[in-house]
Image (spheres, grey):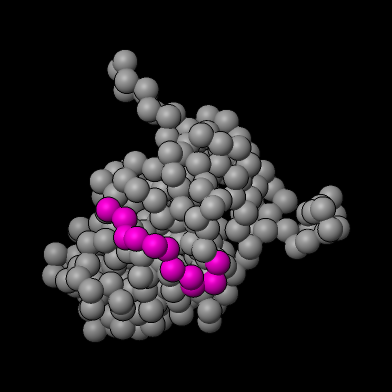
Amino acid sequence: MQTGYIETESGTAPTPILRAEGLRKTYRRNAITTEVLRGVDLTVPAGEFLSIVGASGSGKSTLMHLLGSLDSVDEGTIWLENRRIDGLPSRERDKLRNGTFGFIFQFYHLLPEFTALENVMSPELVASTIWQWPFRRGAAKRRAEELLERVGLSHRKHHRPCEMSGGEMQRTAIARAIMTRPRVLFADEPTGNLDEAAGSEIMSLLKDLNRTDGLTVLMVTHNMEMAASTDRVIRLSAGRVDHGRQTPHGGHLPRPLDPSTLEMAIRGVGHDRFPG
């Protein structure tokens, strides 16, 4: 393998930003065993906007959580370019989630006691020691204010989540997700808790981040109209990629899917260093 390239049948090709091979994941609760992923292979080129769809329980969110190091694989490998990232030590996984990866979820997961500005600044706070933060705070505040202006919320920067609409909370969550300039943005049902108008605004923001900033976006969704507007759509079925149902370049899948009923709790993106 050459640096920055992978071997293919036709020679070499640029290394994808994310690559998964043979991913398996089983959850166990008491005597109940549920095999969620059964050998998933996936390649994601840098700069792609990829939608992952499938029926409830097909493993969409589980796949995203494994790729984003929010959960650990039982079997298989995950590569971030030429670096294998499954099985990394906890501190290295924290660094990935706080820097290289960004996350947005259906239910926002904003800190209720923080203002919009403080929520957006929080990834930089998490990444700083108590001694570093006083020197980093000014730059973090300026960037957070710029991001809130970009998502149309500069007038709401001092409002707490309870004072904002669902769409405003999700836009705040997007600004927070890109605070540390990630290379990959994971979006788990980002419009699932919003009305059509607010959902369209969120989708426009994600497309702008993808096209203007070159951000790679992986979106789990049950909204087939939104999925069809992305670069590629893959469908999970019974824990595997349904290769016969992949749709490249904004094609359309034949029927809508039911919303996923599985919402896994977000896990921390770093060490708990928030002020008491």
Count the labels in the image: 0
Residue shown at 38% from the left, 82% from the top: 150
- Between residue 80 and residue 96, name the one nearer to us: 80
* Image side of residue 111 versus residue 63, left or right: left
Residue 171 lies in magenta, yes or no?
Answer: no
Residue that sits furthest to the left in the current view: 163
Residue shown at 33% from the left, 52% from the top: 274
Residue shown at 51% from the left, 48% from the top: 242
Residue that sits furthest to the top in the current view: 31
Residue shown at 46% from the left, 53% from the top: 235
- Between residue 218 and residue 126, name the one nearer to us: 218
Q: Is residue 136 visible?
A: no
Q: Which image quarter: residue 124? A: bottom left
- Between residue 134 and residue 17, name the one nearer to us: 17
Q: Main secondary structure of the magenta part?
A: loop
* Image side of residue 158 versus residue 104, left or right: left
Depicted 54 relative to depicted 121: above or below:
above
Depicted 177 relative to depicted 209: above or below:
above
* Percent of width and height locating residue 239: 46, 39
Q: Is residue 151 visible?
A: yes
* Percent of width and height locating residue 271: 42, 45
Magenta span: 248-258
* Percent of width and height locating residue 218: 48, 60
* Percent of width and height locating residue 199: 28, 72
- Between residue 271 and residue 63, name the one nearer to us: 63
